[in-house]
Image (cartoon, rainbow, N blue to C red):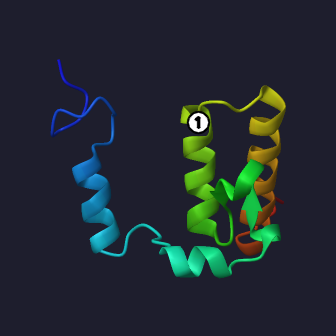
Amino acid sequence: MKPGVDGSPFLVSTRLLSINVERGLMARLDKASRDALPAKDFAGPHRSFPVNDADHARAALMDVNKAKGLTAGEKSEIRAQARKELKRNHPLPKHK
């Protein structure tokens, strides 16, 4: 059985991802915009995961386990930085 609707090995197919980007449901960052971001807006080595906004922070959290060549510590730091960005821009409501 094929996980992706278009036969891709990923649960969310590349076709669905491109449709979501086209519809504006996912963040898109072109090369010029990415290059213009300061180093503080990235998590991971070599500017590997942009976390400049909530959409990219969520993407980093979802994709960090798929990344190859990262140590457990680097993955942990990426998750922490992505969560920090999410809390900063979209704080969770406080329970009474």
Q: Residue at x 38, y 69 (%)?
A: 25
Residue 8: where, in percent of width, then height?
A: 24, 34
Q: Is residue 1 above or below residue 4?
A: above
Where, quadrant-wise, is the C terminus in this rendering? bottom right
Q: Residue at x 81, y 48 (%)?
A: 80
Residue 67: where, in percent of width, then height?
A: 58, 36
Question: Which one is in front, 81 or 30?
Answer: 30
Question: Which one is in front, 79 or 66?
Answer: 66
In the picture of the structure, the residue carrying the numbered disc 1 is: 67
* Quarter location, residue 41: bottom right
Where, quadrant-wise, is the N terminus in this rendering? top left
Work out whether residue 96 can be spotted: yes
How many other residues sit within 10 Å of disc 1, few (<14), some (14-19) or many (≥20)? Answer: few
Q: Amino acid at mark 1?
A: Ala
Residue 26: where, in percent of width, then height?
A: 42, 67
Q: Is residue 14 above or below residue 68?
A: below
How many labels sit on residues?
Answer: 1
Judge from the rendering whether residue 68 lies leftward or rightward of residue 31; answer left or right. Answer: right
